[in-house]
């Protein structure tokens, strides 16, 4: 069955521009009315402009509620991910510091999946933290402005970085990024210490707070230990020739 349709007459008024004596254009006081006829389903024949605005506002509010619900779900999901990753990272540091001589600890650290959970958590949170203005805040600038003035563009600024990391998801991704880097550096320190017989407990403790500083402490410790070992080794006695 064909749906009943009704005709709506739409009128629009506008000022028709006229030409002035000096050649310019100026709006005329005459108002021309344009009439359009639009066929719409009969179910919408009683809709007024107020009804249309109300429905549009209702759809906007519904979309806003969906966006807020999505953001709440993401935030509620990020909390346990960050907590579990932090507990896992701290337990790895404690195990390497407290029991470096156990065989199962060394075998576990040698396997590549040792840092995989934290790395996957970081990838997940990082993908959720990306927004439309992330790159603009991190590297502000304009190519047109750079070509016009010759000033360097797209350089990170502290104001944009501070605003970027004031967001919850971006701060969570930063924390997991630091945790992944520190755990990766601690794994290298632990395996290198086992390979050369160098104590790594103090270097791992420093690495838990600052990964690059922990690496520097381990390099200095390794150089000092190897130098002391070379000095402690007795010099070989010269071989004495035996005459026939």
Image (tube, grey):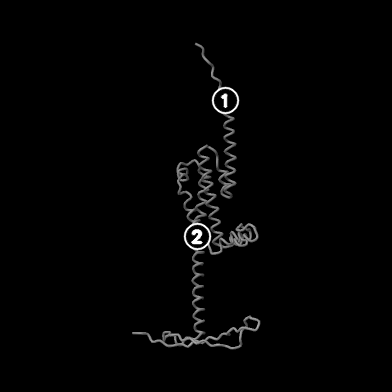
* Nearer to the camera, 168 or 100: 168
Residue 8, image x, y percentages: 46, 87
Q: Residue at x 50, y 79 (%)?
A: 56
Question: In screen coordinates, is 171 left or right of 37?
Answer: right
Is residue 38 positioned above or below 178 on the image? below
Q: Residue at x 52, y 40 (%)?
A: 192
Badge nearest the viewer, 1 or 2: 2
Residue 126, image x, y percentages: 51, 58
Residue 165: in sight, yes or no?
A: no
**Residue at the extreme top:** 244
Which circle marks residue 235 in the picture? 1
Marks 1 and 2, how far apart in space? Answer: 59 Å
Crowd tier of the residue under label 1, counting other residues whose Cα lies within 10 Å: few below 14, some 14–19, many 20 or above:
few
Secondary structure beneath label 1? loop
Residue at label 2? 127
Q: Residue at x 56, y 85 (%)?
A: 14
| Quadrant that contains the N terminus | bottom left
Q: Residue at x 47, y 55 (%)?
A: 120
Residue 107, image x, y percentages: 45, 43
Is residue 17 positioned above or below 244 on the image? below
Q: Earlier in the sequence, mark 1 or mark 2?
A: 2
């Amino acid at each position: 069955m064909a749906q009943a349709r009704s005709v709506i007459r739409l009128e629009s008024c506008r000022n028709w521009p006229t030409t002035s004596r000096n050649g310019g254009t100026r709006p005329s006081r005459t108002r021309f009315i344009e009439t359009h006829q639009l066929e719409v389903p009969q179910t919408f024949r009683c809709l007024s402009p107020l009804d249309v605005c109300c429905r549009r506002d209702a759809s906007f509010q519904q979309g806003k509620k969906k966006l807020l619900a999505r953001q709440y779900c993401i935030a509620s999901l990020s909390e346990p991910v960050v907590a579990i990753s932090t507990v896992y990272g701290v337990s790895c540091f404690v195990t390497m510091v407290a029991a470096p001589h156990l065989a199962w600890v060394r075998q576990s650290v040698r396997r590549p999946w040792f840092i995989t959970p934290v790395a996957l958590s970081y990838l997940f949170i990082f993908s959720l933290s990306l927004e439309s203005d992330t790159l603009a805040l991190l590297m502000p600038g304009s190519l047109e402005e750079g070509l016009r003035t010759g000033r360097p563009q797209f350089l990170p600024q502290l104001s944009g970085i501070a605003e970027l990391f004031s967001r919850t998801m971006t701060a969570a991704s930063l924390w997991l990024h630091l945790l992944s880097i520190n755990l990766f550096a601690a794994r290298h320190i632990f395996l290198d210490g086992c390979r050369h017989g160098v104590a790594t407990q103090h270097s791992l403790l420093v690495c838990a707070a600052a990964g690059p500083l922990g690496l520097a402490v381990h390099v200095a410790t390794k150089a000092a230990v190897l130098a002391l070992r070379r000095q402690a080794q007795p010099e070989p006695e010269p071989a004495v020739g035996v005459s026939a």
